[in-house]
Image (cartoon, rainbow, N blue to C red):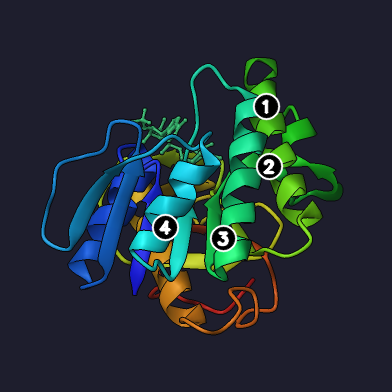
Amino acid sequence: MTIAVLGATGMVGSRVVGEAGARGHRVLALSRKPPGQGPNVTPVAVDANDPSALREALTGATADAVVLTVRTLPVDQEFLVGATRTVLDVAARLGIRVLVVGGAGALRSPEDRGLLVADNPAYVPDEWRPVAAAGTAQLRACQAHPDADWAYLSPPALLEPGDRTGRYRRGTDTLLTGADGRSWISAEDLAVAVVDELETSGPGRHIHDVHRIRHFTVVHCDESPGLAAPA
Ligand SMILES: NC(=O)c1ccc[n+]([C@@H]2O[C@H](COP(=O)([O-])OP(=O)(O)OC[C@H]3O[C@@H](n4cnc5c(N)ncnc54)[C@H](OP(=O)(O)O)[C@@H]3O)[C@@H](O)[C@H]2O)c1
C-alpha cells in the first residue's frame, strides 16, 4: 500500500511512519516541516489547512489511505475540525480511505456508557476538557461527512512513547482498561494497531467493513497478540 501520514513528525505520526515503512509499505510523510527521507519514506511539506496542496500530495503518489494524526498545542478545535473536513473532502474525491487518530474523550465511560469520557471528571480533569472536546468534535465531523470512507481510532486514556510489543486489545466505542486497571498503550503499539487496521481493511474495501464499526479503540495487552476480537 501507499500510506500518507499527515502529522508525520508527531508522537503518533512518526511511529506510524516507522511501522508502515518497516512493513514494506510506501509512506508519504506529510507535515509542514516533514521528516528526512528514509527507506520507503517520502517526505512532503504540506499544510493541512491547504486543500489544493493536500490534494496534489495525495493524488501525485496515488495513496491508498491517509492517516490523520495532526494536533496543535494549545488545542485549536477550529483547526482540528477544519483540517479533518479538508482531509475527508479530498479523500472522498480521490476515493481513498481515512484513518483518524483522535482522542479518548470521544469514547463512552465504561461505568456509564451514557457519559462521554470527555465529560467525565474521573478521566478528564478540567484543564484537559478543551482537548477532549476537540477530539469529540473531530469525531462528529467524521460522522457528519456524507461521502468519506473513514474510521476513527480513539487511544486509551494514556498514550505515550514506549516499547513496541505488538500486543494490544481492540474494542469499539467504550474506553478500555488493561488487566492492571490502566487505560494505556504505547505510541509504538498504537502504530501497530493503525497499520493492522489498514492492512486488514485492504485497498478496494471500505475501511469500516471488516469490523463493521467506524469508531474503535485499543489498549495495551500483556496476554494475547494483536488483532484480538473486539471487546
Ligand atoms: N489519550 C489520548 O486521547 C491522546 C493522547 C495523545 C495524543 N492523542 C491524539 O493523537 C493524535 C496525534 O497526537 P500527537 O501527540 O502525535 O501530536 P503531536 O506530537 O503534537 O504532533 C502533531 C503533528 O501535527 C502536525 N501538524 C500540526 N499542524 C499542522 C498543519 N497545519 N499541517 C500539517 N501538519 C500539522 C505537526 O507537524 P508540523 O508542525 O511539522 O506541521 C506534527 O507532526 C491527535 O489527534 C491527538 O489528539 C490522543
* Image marks 2 and 4: residues in contact by CB distance under 8 Å: no
Q: How many marks?
A: 4
On the image, the x and y values in percent for residue 153 come to 57, 56
Amino acid at dot 1: Glu
Q: Report how far apart the C-alphas of labels 3 and 1 lie in the structure.
A: 20 Å
Q: Which mark is residue 91?
A: 3
Q: Report how far apart the C-alphas of labels 2 and 1 lie in the structure.
A: 9 Å
Give the quadrant of the C terminus.
Answer: bottom right
Amino acid at dot 3: Ala
- Whether residue 190 can be seen here: no
Q: Is residue 64 above or below residue 75?
A: below
Q: Earlier in the sequence, mark 2 or mark 4?
A: 4
Q: In the structure shown, which secondary structural element does the residue marked by tag 2 occupy?
A: helix
Residue that carries the numbered disc 2 in the rendered image: 138
Q: Which of marks 4 and 1 is nearer the N terminus?
A: 4
Other-residue count near label 2 (Cα within 10 Å), few / some / many at <14 / 14–19 / ≥20: many
Residue 32: quadrant of the picture: top left
Q: Residue 58 carries which label?
A: 4
Q: Earlier in the sequence, mark 2 or mark 3?
A: 3
Q: Report how far apart the C-alphas of labels 4 and 1 lie in the structure.
A: 23 Å
On the image, the x and y values in percent for residue 55 come to 48, 52
Residue that carries the numbered disc 1 in the rendered image: 78
User: Which of the four quarters of the rendered structure image does ligand 1 lie in?
Assistant: top left
On the image, the x and y values in percent for residue 157 come to 56, 41
Residue beneath the point at 66% across and 45% down: 85
Image-based side of 22 in relation to 44, left or right: left
Q: Earlier in the sequence, mark 3 or mark 1?
A: 1
Residue situated in front as seen by the camera: 15 or 207: 207
